């Protein structure tokens, strides 16, 4: 009998599938989900729209309705197009596939979003990671050397960055774009919580595309991401998009959501307020916190690590340990900012867990 080891690539066999921590019965604060889903006043309208969605038909392959609503909301001029993905993860896959060849390089800061690295490996593209400095900002001399050496076809900059939560200094981002011989992808997964929007970079730079997602704003379950770029880029990427990659239920839901973005962003403001409060509370518990422009906070202390995450789990709360993922993140945890009630439960579990560990 033919076995996987005789067929599947060695580098694929040595991988481990993306691990999602079991969260049954836990308050889930490990994955930057929003506590708010569909606004209540839209629920009836949404259910009616779902009832009218023809499941026996293939989805609209061109996503005309979503595209025109988004273009209107973002004031996009004709020279730009939108590429839709089954989450922005799928867009990362399309982007990397489009440049995959023996000598192509993808570059991103480290630590940053792991999919840039993982998808590169799947496609046998070399990924070069450039370490952030101790403030989690860009080390420009290191980038200058690395860009000159490796000539990356694509550079991914998550702004704000995951898992560190910060925006890089704007001049550093601009310098990277100006030095880049290829495409620079500005990944704005956390735009709703950020003080900087890079859409205007599209007008300033021909080698920039902007990628976004609805996942961190209350719609992780529908899996919808999009990329805005000059039409000439979208024309090429579209050739690698699976036909019907965004299903009808998602399209129906998104068409409604895209008409009510102001209600959605009001909820983001609540999270931003809570982020401020939580940051203060975490400092009062003796933790170091890092400035965040996203819906999560990175906290550090000698007592933090995998054991505190385990101790919190026994108290019903799931957060993420960053220990071991990168030297800059030793003794760090990442906590999703949620509603006030959720955050209070989290703080109580954290305080109790820290007390218990300090006594040992
Ligand atoms: C969560 C996240 C994504 C992926 O989002 P999906 O649309 O859910 O696939 C992309 N980039 C960054 C930086 C993220 O944190």
Image (cartoon, helix red, strand yellow):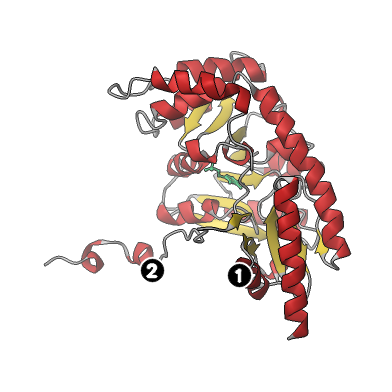
Q: In this picture, is 151 found above or below 132?
A: above
Question: Left or right of 45: which side holds 169?
Answer: right
Label 2, secondary structure: give it: loop
The structure residue drawn at horizontal position 64% and vertical position 67%, both measured from the top left corner, is 315
Query: Where's residue 195, x and y in %?
Result: 79, 37
The structure residue drawn at horizontal position 58% and vertical position 22%, both measured from the top left corner, is 42
Q: How many tags in the picture?
A: 2
Question: Left or right of 235: which side holds 77?
Answer: right
Query: On residue 314, which mark appears?
Result: 1
Question: Which is closer to the viewer, label 2 or label 1?
Answer: 1
Classify the position of the C terminus by image quarter. Answer: bottom right
The first of marks 2 and 1 along the sequence is 2
Q: Is mark 1 within 8 Å of ligand 1?
A: no
Residue on which disc 2 sits: 14
Residue 209 lies in what quarter of the image?
A: top right
Q: Residues within 10 Å of mark 1 (few under 14, many from 20)?
A: few
Depth order, front residue of 293/238: 293
Question: Left or right of 284: which side holds 163?
Answer: left
Q: In this picture, is 289 found above or below 303?
A: above
């Amino acid at each position: 009998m033919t076995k996987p080891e005789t067929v599947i690539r060695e580098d694929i066999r040595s991988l481990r599938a993306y691990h999602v921590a079991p969260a049954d019965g836990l308050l889930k604060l490990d994955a930057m989900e929003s506590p708010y889903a569909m606004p209540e006043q839209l629920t009836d309208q949404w259910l009616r729209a779902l009832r009218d969605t023809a499941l026996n038909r293939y989805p609209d392959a061109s996503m005309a309705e979503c595209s025109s609503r988004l273009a209107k909301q973002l004031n996009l001029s004709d020279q730009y197009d939108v590429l839709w993905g089954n989450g922005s993860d799928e867009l990362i896959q399309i982007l990397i596939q489009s440049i995959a060849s023996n000598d192509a390089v993808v570059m991103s800061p480290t630590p940053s979003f792991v999919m840039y690295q993982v998808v590169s490996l799947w496609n046998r593209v070399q990924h070069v990671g450039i370490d952030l400095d101790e403030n989690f900002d860009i080390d420009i001399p290191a980038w200058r050397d690395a860009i000159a050496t490796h000539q990356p076809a694509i550079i991914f900059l998550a702004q704000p960055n995951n898992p560190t939560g910060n925006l890089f200094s704007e001049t550093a981002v601009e310098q990277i774009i100006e030095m880049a011989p290829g495409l620079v992808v500005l990944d704005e997964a956390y735009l709703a919580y950020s003080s900087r929007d890079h859409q205007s970079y599209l007008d300033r730079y021909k080698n920039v595309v902007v990628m976004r997602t609805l996942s961190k704003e209350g719609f992780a379950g529908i899996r919808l991401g999009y990329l805005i770029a000059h039409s000439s880029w979208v024309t090429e990427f579209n050739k690698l998009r699976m036909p019907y990659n965004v299903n009808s239920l998602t399209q129906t839901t998104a068409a409604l959501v895209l008409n009510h973005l102001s209600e959605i962003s009001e909820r983001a403001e609540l999270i931003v307020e809570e982020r401020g409060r939580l940051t203060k509370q975490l400092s009062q518990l003796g933790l170091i916190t890092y400035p965040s422009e996203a819906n999560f906070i990175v906290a550090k202390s000698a007592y933090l690590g995998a054991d505190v995450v385990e101790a919190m789990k026994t108290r019903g709360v799931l957060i993420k340990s960053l220990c071991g993922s990168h030297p800059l993140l030793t003794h760090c945890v990442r906590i999703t900012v949620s509603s006030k009630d959720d955050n209070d439960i989290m703080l109580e579990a954290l305080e109790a867990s820290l007390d218990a560990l300090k006594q040992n």
